[in-house]
Image (cartoon, rainbow, N blue to C red):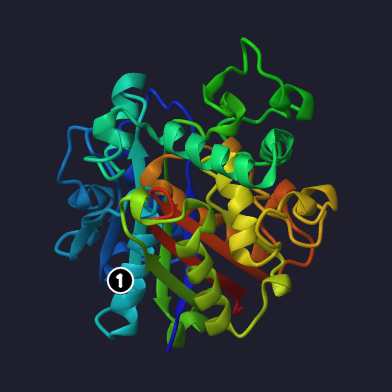
Amino acid sequence: MGVCIVGWAHTPFGRLDTQDLESLIVGVTRESIEHAGITASEVEGIWLGQLNGGFSPEIFASSLVLQADEGLRWKPATRVENACASGAAALYAACDAIEAGRARIALVVGAEKMTAVSGAETTRILGNASYVKEEAALGLTFPGIFGQIAQAYFDRYGDHSATLAHIAAKNHANGVRNPWAQMRKDLGFEFCNTVSDRNPLVATPLRKTDCSLVSDGAAALVVVDSSIAKQFPRAIRLRSRAQVNDFLPMSRRDALAFEGPRRAWGEALSQAGCKVTDLSLAEVHDCFTIAELLSYEAMGLAAPGQGARLLADGVVHAHGSLPINPSGGLKAKGHPIGATGVSMHVLASMQLMGEAGDMQVPGASLAGVFNMGGSAVASYVSVLERQR
């Protein structure tokens, strides 16, 4: 028994002023159903990944998916929220239902409309995904949280400002090749490494180019029981998946250990029966450049404090032995919260099908996906491979 991805859809990410939450959801729902070659009536369950938290007035959005097609009426639909990992959480809930025998075909949608509120309100909403009484209530924002993590990394391992700039430059260069990316501009290392009016410090030592983007967008997946995957022209198997949750308060954790992501990667790779170096590529949660650097170490690609070597050696670049975020990542692609985890699985599936266009990693056969909620609180890791 297992689960396969057999269809998908993806909107552009960015400031989408002509679309509201409903139109984003409806668009990818219709496109993914068509891409899978099924009718809406064949869907047996719907899961929507969405944070909301005040971004949109609709607090009961799960049935908005039904607006896409009359055939979805009466289908069970559930909204799933797990901070920035809401998309992966929705996918895993659908997988659970399929593996339990409660559905054979499921629809997973991830969506967020973030730009309809002010920047200050965006900061407040996202901050509330922290341990509020010790963090957000004291004025600590998520850039502030990851700024503290970056400063702790620098204090322990030396100044890695240039390392973070190399990550930002890499991902912006990759984003140029992604037709759905919010920012398709190669900013270059010097720009990313220099504090300026256009690249100010946001939360020391993080600069604007070290922070992911505020975005609107949606993505969707059709997932099925692997026993019927042969009926579809595309089938990407979830060879393994692991979810790990850690304590919410940062005061109870060593943030630099990135222990939740480390455990999730370890479990997923063990279940898949492979090593991290067997992966052809990985899409990882670079909400801030320091998160990508810590991900290298959590994946087991480098010892603690040694992640910079992967950039210097070219390992994680687009033509390296293990490209990380060939899509441009959250840094360039954008980060519409509920859509992010679904988007990662869509893009990894496209790579494995050889359908990633200018982003294509030659010969991609095995992909890793890491979607994270909060400051390494909720960690989801999938290993994907092509079944047909």
SS assignment at label 1: helix
Question: Seen in the image, is 350 located left or right of residue 249?
Answer: right
Give the residue at x 31% y 43%. 130
Q: Residue furthest front?
A: 155
Give how far across and how far down residue 131 sits, in percent. Answer: 27, 45
Q: Is residue 345 visible?
A: no
Q: Which is more toward the observer, 242 or 312?
A: 312
Q: Which is more toward the observer, 212 or 326?
A: 212
Q: Which is more toward the observer, 320 or 311?
A: 311
Query: Callout 1: 10 Å neighbours few (<14), some, many (20+)?
Result: some
Q: Residue furthest top?
A: 197
Question: Where does the N terminus fall, quadrant-wise?
Answer: bottom left
Give how far across and how far down residue 281 sits, in percent. Answer: 68, 61
Question: Where does the C terminus fall, quadrant-wise?
Answer: bottom right
Q: Residue furthest right?
A: 313
Q: How many marks?
A: 1
Give how far across and how far down residue 7 sits, in percent. Answer: 48, 63
Looking at the image, residue 133 lies above or below residue 83: above
> Residue 379 lies in what quarter of the image?
bottom left
Give the residue at x 73% y 71%. 277
Question: Seen in the image, is 299 located left or right of residue 190?
Answer: left
Q: Is residue 346 visible?
A: yes
Q: Which is more toward the observer, 153 or 211?
A: 153
Question: Seen in the image, is 80 located left or right of residue 4?
Answer: left
Q: Tell me the amino acid under the disc marked 1.
A: Glu
Report the residue marked by disc 1: 42
Looking at the image, residue 149 lies above or below residue 29: above
Give how far across and how far down residue 90 sits, in percent. Answer: 33, 61
